[in-house]
């Protein structure tokens, strides 16, 4: 592969698919995958062929109710990653300036560069609890800025950006004549207390999400975009170049799953409450680490006070059969991302191995 082609890949996604798996996998960021038999599916609920090439109406209607928007604002996509791709492709032309938080989810950065955007950054600093400094963000905007990109809950830290801050960002974007893309997939881990989508704060907002992280439904690839109707229509037409028509069996299964989210949510919420307490106790016990500890979500982003986090991650995986995500994938090499949406026994065993690796380092 040439250097020019290598620039148009995601190093993080390649690592996640080929090197993250370990006996004790703390690199995952979503709930354990549900098996088909764990939610009630009747064969009569399914079909493989659709007469609706621009989205299955019952699925769009279910998502519209969930997001409290008109059905014409919904665009379905294969997971949040592809939802981000489709949204950004509809919003950005080559040479446009895109302002992206730092640190961020690496595929967002790679995607903007793949689309030919000029990428600028604004910092989310550890010392400030990884919160957004809106004044600094505003100073980073220029006449060429066409899109601001943020994640909420923030990936990789799990930190919540409150609606007041999001609203101010929208006001700045409106004045500058640009849009705001908000990846809200981890916001689903608020479950029944999920805040309203940023889309409700102004027409400049475009929101993406999915059922992948909070509900153990990654295999359905049920992702979506919320955008004003004219922009949503543009995305559906652009998708003709990418995916043509959705996988209809997946659409049907997604409708079934959405009807059962209350039951799925109860199990997921209980697991995260229990596991967060375990992770908090671990972090409190280790003086080598410091971390911003979010109240919600499935991830935390500790900082190793001394030594190389990359070397620590390598030792942890090779000697202790445990994986976390090296901070280099989020441009913060002294950190690592730890996921705790896993079965409690695996979490405890994995954390015990983190202790042993920290002692060795």
Image (cartoon, rainbow, N blue to C red):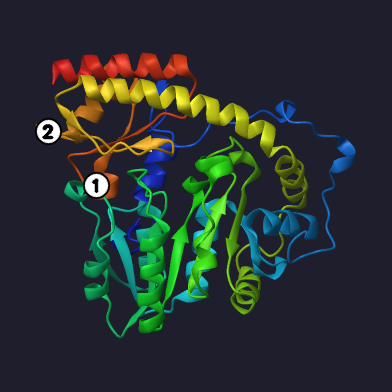
At horizontal 60% and vertical 74% (from top left) the residue drawn is 228
Q: Which residue is mark 2?
A: 305
Q: Which residue is mark 1?
A: 129
Q: The N terminus appears in which quarter of the rendering?
A: bottom left
Would you identify the image quadrant in which residue 230 lies?
Answer: bottom right
Sequence-wise, the earlier of marks 2 and 1 is 1
Would you identify the image quadrant in which residue 351 lies?
Answer: top left
At horizontal 59% and vertical 37% (from top left) the residue drawn is 215
Note whether 57 is above or below 146 in the view shown.
Answer: above
Q: Is residue 100 left or right of residue 41?
A: left
Q: Secondary structure at mark 2?
A: loop
Q: Residue furthest left?
A: 306
At horizontal 39% and vertical 64% (from top left) the residue drawn is 149
Residue 177 bears which disc, if any? none
Tag in front: 2 or 1 = 1
Instruction: Identify which residue, 277 or 322, lies in the foreground.
Output: 277
Instruction: Identify which residue, 20 or 192, lies in the foreground.
Output: 192
Q: Is residue 319 left or right of residue 306?
A: right
At horizontal 30% and vertical 86% (from top left) the residue drawn is 143
Distance, label 2 to label 1, CA atoms, is 16 Å
Note whether 23 is above or below 333 in the view shown.
Answer: above
Residue 339: x, y in percent? 39, 32
Q: Are marks 2 and 1 in contact (CB under 8 Å)?
A: no
Q: Is residue 208 left or right of residue 139?
A: right
Residue 304: x, y in percent? 16, 33
Q: Secondary structure at mark 1?
A: loop
Q: Residues within 10 Å of mark 2 (few under 14, many from 20)?
A: few
Residue 352: x, y in percent? 30, 14
Residue 253: x, y in percent? 75, 43
Q: Is residue 170 visible?
A: yes
């Amino acid at each position: 592969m040439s250097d020019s082609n290598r620039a148009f890949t995601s190093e993080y996604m390649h690592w996640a698919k080929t090197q993250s798996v370990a006996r004790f996998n703390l690199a995952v960021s979503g709930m354990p995958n549900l098996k088909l038999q764990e939610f009630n599916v009747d064969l009569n609920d399914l079909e493989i062929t659709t007469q609706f090439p621009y989205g299955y109406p019952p699925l769009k209607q279910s998502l519209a109710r969930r997001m409290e928007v008109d059905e014409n604002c919904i665009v379905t996509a294969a997971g949040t990653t592809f939802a981000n791709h489709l949204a950004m492709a509809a919003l950005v032309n080559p040479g446009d300036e895109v302002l992206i938080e730092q640190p961020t989810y690496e595929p967002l950065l790679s995607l903007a560069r793949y689309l030919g955007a000029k990428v600028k950054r604004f910092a989310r600093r550890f010392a400030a609890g990884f919160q957004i400094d809106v004044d600094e963000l505003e100073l980073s905007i220029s006449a060429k800025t066409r899109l601001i990109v943020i994640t909420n809950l923030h990936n990789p830290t799990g930190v919540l950006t409150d609606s007041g801050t999001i609203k101010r960002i929208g006001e700045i974007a409106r004045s500058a004549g640009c849009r705001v893309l908000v990846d809200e997939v981890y916001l689903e881990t608020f479950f029944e207390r999920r805040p309203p989508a940023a889309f409700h704060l102004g027409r400049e907002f475009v929101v993406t999400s999915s059922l992948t992280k909070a509900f153990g439904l990654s295999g359905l690839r049920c992702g979506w975009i919320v955008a004003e109707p004219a922009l949503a229509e543009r995305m559906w037409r652009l998708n003709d170049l990418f995916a043509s028509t959705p996988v209809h069996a997946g659409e049907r299964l997604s409708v079934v799953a959405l009807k059962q989210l209350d039951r799925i949510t109860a199990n997921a919420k209980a697991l995260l409450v229990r596991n967060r307490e375990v992770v908090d106790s671990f972090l409190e016990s280790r003086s080598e680490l410091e971390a911003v500890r979010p109240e919600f979500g499935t991830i935390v982003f500790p900082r190793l006070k001394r030594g190389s986090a990359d070397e620590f991650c390598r030792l942890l995986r090779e000697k202790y059969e445990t994986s976390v995500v090296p901070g280099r994938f989020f441009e913060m090499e002294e950190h690592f991302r730890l996921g705790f949406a896993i079965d409690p026994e695996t979490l405890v065993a994995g954390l015990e191995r983190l202790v042993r690796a920290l002692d060795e380092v």
